[in-house]
Amino acid sequence: MQGRTGRVILPILVTVLVTGLLSSCGFHRKYENPIAKDTVQPDKMLFDKAISDLERGRYDVARLTLQTLIGTYDSSEFLAKAKLALADSWFREGGAAGLANAEAEYKDFILFYPMLEEASEAQEKVCLLHYRQMDKPDRDADQAMKADQECRAVIEQFPNSKFAPQAQQYVRNIQEVLAESEYRTGSFYYNKKSFVAAASRFQGLTDHYPLFSNADDALWKQGDSYSHLGTRFSPQATEAYSRILQFYPLSIHADAARKRLASLEQPIPEPDPVAAARMKYELANQDKPGVFSHFWGIFRSRPDVSMAAKSGTPATTVLRPAVPVSITFQTPAAGEVGSDVTVSTVPDTGTPDATPQLQPR
């Protein structure tokens, strides 16, 4: 009896596993933008056939059918849907060439149909294709920067679309990765005791990415770097310590920052209530890493964005390199043609290496 039951159950299990495998590979995956209108018009029939092929992974056949529709029925009411489906076919196919073609097709769609509701979806797909190619913070940041630009475009160009809230979270995740890259560079200089370079990196990071999960630690290292540069930079150190207490009052560095301010004989700022509430919200809604998350992290190709902020407005511009803290700019007097750096010749000291030097003004 048991053997007979096993012979009955085994084929069912195999069928379930095969079905799950096929669905995970993209076969028969439903298309997001079908046309519900029931008609026997030839252009609608071509569209339906293309979508059927697209859902079954026959992308070349689907594109050929869509191109036939677009080329033959240039005034069809389904023309916009066909152009979007053409881009979607490349997006679903994936790969470097497929995603490049998908981006070009989506951009064309937005250009020709900027007022259609699907234009926001096309921009969201452009955002998503770069987001999915984003590398870890210690690798090339090209895709992350492109994703930052394209995802911000969803928010800026289509602020009322249903894709805007998710795009804003994508931007927070992307900027967490970009900020982490800057943080690691600044920490490298800080650990090497190159405090000028460290202070410049941390200054640019904390000014541009206040939502960064390690912004309080970056501010602490920023203030400490300025402190090592002498009393000339005491105002900058004071600002960094004050920002910890104002905007990151729950930070582990809060007590130490309070003591530093006291030693500098500076006032202790009160916590900003909005910032304190946001920090409590972030701590309460933080994604908890799994038991093996750190182990599998070395094998993961995608960056870990579990620590990214879940609230707050992300930066709306690209990070610009900070001016090194050792360089000061002077404005020329009225009528004077000046520059920030002048060239002068060091007086002859009789040594063979007396060469022209660049002297800061």
Image: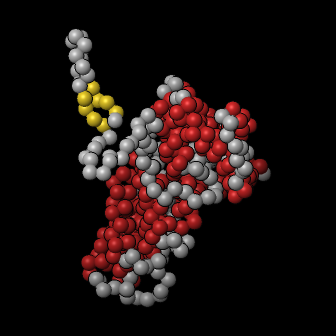
Q: Is residue 310 left or right of residue 353?
A: right
| Residue 6 placement (x, y as % from top left) | 71, 50
Q: Residue at x 68, y 49 (%)?
A: 246
266 or 225, nearer to the observer: 266
Colour scheme of this structure image? secondary structure
Q: Residue at x 28, y 83 (%)?
A: 74
288 in relation to 229, above or below: below
Q: Is residue 277 above or below residue 141?
A: below
Residue 58 visible, this angle: no
Q: Residue at x 40, y 47 (%)?
A: 142
* Percent x, y of residue 21: 55, 54
Looking at the picture, does residue 51 appear above or below residue 102? below
| Residue 95 in sight here | yes
Across and down, in percent, residue 264 comes to 66, 34
Res 221 → quadrant: top right
Q: Position of residue 10 (x, y in %)?
A: 66, 52
Q: Could you tell me which quadrant the C terminus lies in?
A: top left
- In the rendered structure, the answer to whether residue 91 lies left or right of residue 271 reads left
Q: Nearer the viewer, residue 331 or 149?
A: 331
Q: Is residue 152 left or right of residue 169?
A: left
Between 213 and 292, the residue placed more toward the observer is 213
Residue found at the far right of this picture: 1
Residue extending furthest front?
A: 334
**Number of marks in the rendered image:** 0
Say above or below: 232 vs 174.
Answer: above
**Going 72% across and 50% down the picture, which residue do you hit?**
271
Q: Nearer the viewer, residue 12 or 203?
A: 203
Q: Quadrant of residue 224?
A: top right
